[in-house]
Image (cartoon, rainbow, N blue to C red):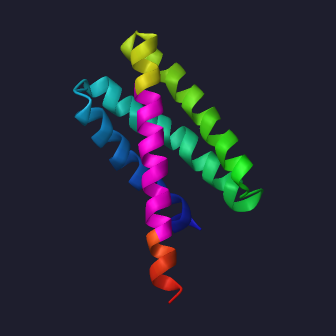
Amino acid sequence: MLKMLLVPLVATIVIELGVLLFLGERHKQVMTGSVAMNVLTNVPLNLFVLYVDDGLCTVVVGEVFVVVVEALCYKRLVGEWWIAWIYSLLCNSISFLTGELFMLIYYLFTTY
């Protein structure tokens, strides 16, 4: 169970920190905040998807909720709404799509 939560969390943190670095973010407070945000949003969403409902609609609604929550947090860290939304949307979109790509690759290589 811990592995099912820890692997996606660590992967998300690494990907999102990479996105922030790519976007030119270098402030320690923002980077640390990103890690904290992911612990607070990724774990509950993954628990809900694992144990309650793993349907596409649930995942999409959960991801939208995460984007909004993280944008609010980024706003407090960076001060500008437009930067907060860009950070949240790009970080979450790229980490989500990367996760889906890895799951597709895993599925393709484990079913044959």
* Residue 107 position (above or below residue 83): below
Identity of the residue drawn at 66% across and 49% down: 59
Relative to the observer, which residue lies in front, 85 or 78? Answer: 85
Left or right: residue 95 compared with residue 40? left
Give coordinates of residue 36: x percent, y percent: 45, 36
Q: Nearer the viewer, residue 57 or 76?
A: 57
Magenta-colored stretch includes residue 16: no
Placement of the N terminus among the 4 image quadrants: bottom right
Q: Main secondary structure of the magenta part?
A: helix
Residue numbers of the magenta segment: 87-104
Which percent across, then down, holds residue 48? 70, 52
Q: With respect to residue 30, does 37 lie above or below?
A: below
Question: In the depicted view, which residue is nearer to us: 37 or 106?
Answer: 106
> Considering only vertical position in the picture, is 76 above or below 14?
above
The answer to which image quadrant residue 102 occupies is bottom left
Task: Please name the residue shown 42% across and 34% down the image.
Answer: 90
Residue 35, how many percent across, how many down?
40, 38
Q: Is residue 102 magenta?
A: yes
Image spot of residue 53 (x, y percent):
76, 56
- Residue at the bottom extreme, as displayed: 112
